């Protein structure tokens, strides 16, 4: 079945360091790919998305490129801030399955000043 | 335009009681999804509903769990005879139409079974 695998956390970085969180997927159809962010005690907020191969999603300095050849959607940011501390979830949706989201297990990011 | 509203935010139930979780989708959204987040885990799909219809319940436990989305009012996730293993955060998401590329999440209901 469809699945998402992302790197385990926690990831601890110093402010202004570079961030990469790896995400790979398995899907039988043509999925759309998403990164969601969850701040402590809160729900999920969509960070960025890509709906087809080679699309690049970007928001708030974060980027991810839909790579069909490697079935990957790695999240990157060139310079993290303390306020980026949160849990990040990679997810896919296959629309012939009604648009339900399949999530990775989440990666906790902690950014120290 | 209010976002997806879930209530209560926190719910404590004793083993054997019933839990009712409510979700009001964004205005104009007629598709609702429920997800469960167990401690230290990602979110798992439970059920997908449209008004008055269950479209996909492949993620719902076979017993004690049910969901509805009536013509009027919020979507309800109902858990009967709760057990400690039901303790989790339950999130609702809504979208305006089937195949929409974005779902909007509520802040979740954190259920604790004591």
Image: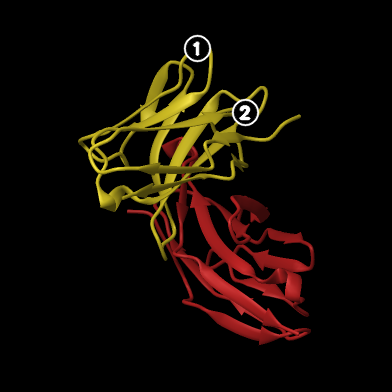
Chain colours: A red, B yellow
Residue B40 in picture, x, y percent from top left = 42, 66
Q: Is residue B10 left or right of residue B88?
A: right
In the depicted structure, whether residue B27 falls above or below residue B101: above
Q: Is residue A54 left or right of residue A99?
A: right
Secondary structure under tag 1 reads: loop
Say which of A25 and B108 sits in front: B108
Q: Which residue is painted at 32% across and 42% down in the image?
A: B59
Residue B98 in picture, x, y percent from top left = 54, 30
Residue A2 in picture, x, y percent from top left = 38, 54
Looking at the rendered structure, whether the residues under marks 2 and 1 are on a common chain is answered as yes
* Chain under numbered label 1: B
Res. B49 image quadrant: top left
Mark 1, Cα crowd under 10 Å, few <14 / some 14-19 / many 20+, is few
Judge whether residue A69 can be spotted in this image. yes
Mark 2, Cα crowd under 10 Å, few <14 / some 14-19 / many 20+, is some
Q: CA distance from mark 2 to mark 1?
A: 15 Å
Res. B56 image quadrant: top left
Q: Which residue is painted at 61% across and 34% down in the image?
A: B5
Question: Which residue position is annotated with label 2?
Answer: B96
Judge whether residue A70 can be spotted in this image. no
In the depicted structure, whether residue A4 falls above or below residue B95: below
2 or 1: tag closer to the N-terminus = 1
Q: Which residue is painted at 20% across and 35% down in the image?
A: B63
Residue A3 in picture, x, y percent from top left = 39, 58
- Do callouts 2 and 1 mark residues in contact (Cβ within 8 Å)? no
Figure quadrant of the C terminus of chain A: bottom right
Q: Which residue is painted at 63% across and 78% down in the image?
A: A110
Q: Nearer the viewer, mark 2 or mark 1?
A: 1
Disc marking residue B49: none
Question: Which residue position is annotated with label 1?
Answer: B71
Most extreme residue toward the left is B63
């Amino acid at each position: 079945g469809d699945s998402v695998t992302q790197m385990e956390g926690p990831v601890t970085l110093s402010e202004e360091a570079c961030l990469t969180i790896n995400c790979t997927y398995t899907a039988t159809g043509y999925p759309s790919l998403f990164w969601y962010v969850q701040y402590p005690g809160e729900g999920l907020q969509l960070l960025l998305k890509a709906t087809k191969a080679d699309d690049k999603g970007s928001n708030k300095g974060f980027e991810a490129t839909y790579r069909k050849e490697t079935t990957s959607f790695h999240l990157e940011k060139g310079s993290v801030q303390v306020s980026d501390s949160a849990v990040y979830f990679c997810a896919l949706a296959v629309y012939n399955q009604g648009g339900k989201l399949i999530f990775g297990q989440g990666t906790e990011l902690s950014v120290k000043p | 335009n209010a976002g997806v509203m879930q209530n209560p935010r926190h719910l404590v139930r004793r083993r054997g009681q019933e839990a009712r979780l409510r979700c009001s989708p964004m205005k104009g959204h007629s598709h609702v999804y429920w997800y469960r987040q167990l401690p230290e885990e990602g979110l798992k799909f439970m059920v997908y509903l449209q008004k008055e219809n269950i479209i996909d319940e492949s993620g719902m436990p076979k017993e004690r769990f049910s969901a509805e989305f009536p013509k009027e009012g919020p979507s309800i996730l109902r858990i009967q005879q709760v057990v400690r293993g039901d303790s989790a955060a339950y999130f609702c998401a809504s979208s305006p139409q089937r195949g929409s590329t974005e779902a909007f999440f509520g802040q979740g209901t954190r259920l604790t079974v004591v």
